[in-house]
């Protein structure tokens, strides 16, 4: 066995520091979930998250849509390079070991980029239900599919959990961010529920201010709760120790959904956050024991 060169060790340390800093600076509940993992698995998840952050930042940026699509196309090329054994970016270099160690599927990285191409559009004016679920599969389910092998369970139940929990988390995000998304000319709510409530406009700001939107939010929240229950059932069929970070993430987002409901859907302009003490309680309850 040939020992790695000092330059190689230094480069690897720089890549590790890069992805760790991305996670630390994101101020996300993701960090809480990953804290319970052993160091090697935690760093693998940091690399997965850093990739998601990189492409998400492109989609959420202020550059023209054509520029965003060009940058996302470069990331497609970088994922190709990663799986060809020649990664060039600090994130993909940090992913080089994990994709082998945990058999991470290339298709899921590409699915995430597909989802970011949806977000890169200049405007999003609602979606059909099947389109919404496909969007959730891409932007959240893909993260789950990359996560569960790192957590330590690649079973069929774990993979189904990744998709269902991704749907639950993304629906919660959508319900939480209606006002913020509208300000960015984005509306993710399903046409079917908008039509049912009598809302014919697809202008994001108009829809966000419509009093009838409370009905839409309530129905979408019911669906999210159903997804959380299904995810909880599937989680119980998986390896308990491996699923600790997934359970912590699920309960953190479930707490957000309950806080949104407690606030009320007619008060959509009032932001909701889960406090640090509540997060600490979740960490103790679902991760430590």
Image: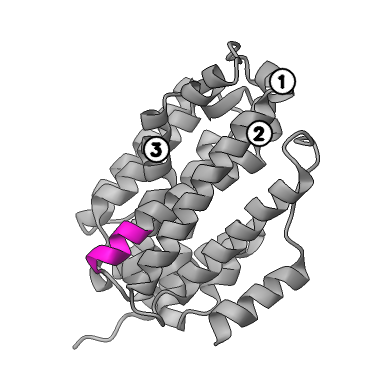
Q: Which residue is mark 2?
A: 178
**Pointers 1 and 2 in contact (CB under 8 A)?**
no
Q: CA distance from mark 1 to mark 2?
A: 12 Å
Check residue 170 for magenta coloring: no
User: What residue sits 66% from the left and 43% below the top?
Assistant: 176
Q: Is residue 82 visible?
A: yes
Q: CA distance from mark 1 to mark 3?
A: 24 Å
Quarter of the image where one finds residue 102: bottom left
Q: Which mark is residue 228?
A: none
**Does residue 288 sit above or below 199 in this rendering?**
below
Q: Is residue 10 visible?
A: no
Q: Which mark is residue 133?
A: 3
Q: CA distance from mark 2 to mark 3?
A: 17 Å
Badge 1 element: loop
Quarter of the image where one finds residue 211: top right
Which badge, 2 or 3, is on the more N-terminal residue? 3
**Does residue 80 sit above or below 125 in this rendering?**
below
Q: Callout 1 environment at 10 Å: few (<14), some (14 to 19), or many (20+)?
A: few
Badge 3 element: helix
Which badge, 1 or 2, is on the more N-terminal residue? 2
- The x and y percentages for residue 144 are 39, 58
User: What residue sits 54% from the left and 87% below the top?
Assistant: 289
User: What residue sits 59% from the left and 58% below the top?
Assistant: 254
- The x and y percentages for residue 115 are 41, 37
**Does residue 215 sit above or below 152 in this rendering?**
above
**Residues in magenta, as a range:** 155-161
């Amino acid at each position: 066995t040939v020992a790695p060169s000092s330059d190689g060790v230094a480069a690897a340390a720089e890549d590790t520091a890069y992805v760790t800093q991305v996670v630390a600076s994101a101020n996300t509940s993701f960090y809480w979930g990953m804290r319970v993992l052993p160091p090697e698995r935690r760093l693998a998840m940091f690399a997965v998250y850093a990739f998601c952050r990189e492409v998400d930042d492109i989609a959420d940026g202020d550059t023209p849509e054509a520029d965003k699509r060009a940058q996302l196309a470069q990331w497609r090329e970088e994922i190709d390079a990663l799986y060809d054994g020649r990664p060039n970016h600090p994130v993909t270099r940090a992913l080089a070991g994990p994709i082998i160690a945990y058999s991470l599927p290339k298709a899921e990285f590409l699915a995430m980029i597909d989802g970011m191409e949806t977000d890169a559009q200049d405007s999003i004016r609602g979606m059909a239900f099947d389109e919404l679920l496909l969007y959730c599969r891409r932007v959240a389910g893909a993260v789950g599919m990359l996560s569960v092998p790192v957590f330590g369970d690649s079973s069929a139940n774990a993979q189904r959990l990744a998709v269902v929990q991704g749907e639950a988390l993304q629906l919660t995000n959508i319900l939480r961010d209606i006002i913020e998304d509208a300000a960015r000319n984005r509306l993710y709510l399903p046409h079917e529920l908008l039509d049912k409530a009598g809302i014919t406009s697809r202008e994001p700001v108009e829809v966000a201010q419509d009093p009838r939107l409370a009905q839409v939010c309530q129905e979408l929240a019911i669906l999210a709760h159903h997804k959380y229950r299904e995810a909880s059932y599937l989680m119980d069929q998986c390896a308990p120790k491996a699923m600790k970070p997934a359970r912590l993430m699920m309960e953190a987002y479930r707490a957000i959904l309950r806080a949104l409901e407690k606030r009320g859907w007619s008060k959509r302009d009032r932001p909701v956050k889960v406090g640090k003490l509540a997060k600490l309680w979740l960490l103790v309850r679902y991760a430590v024991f």
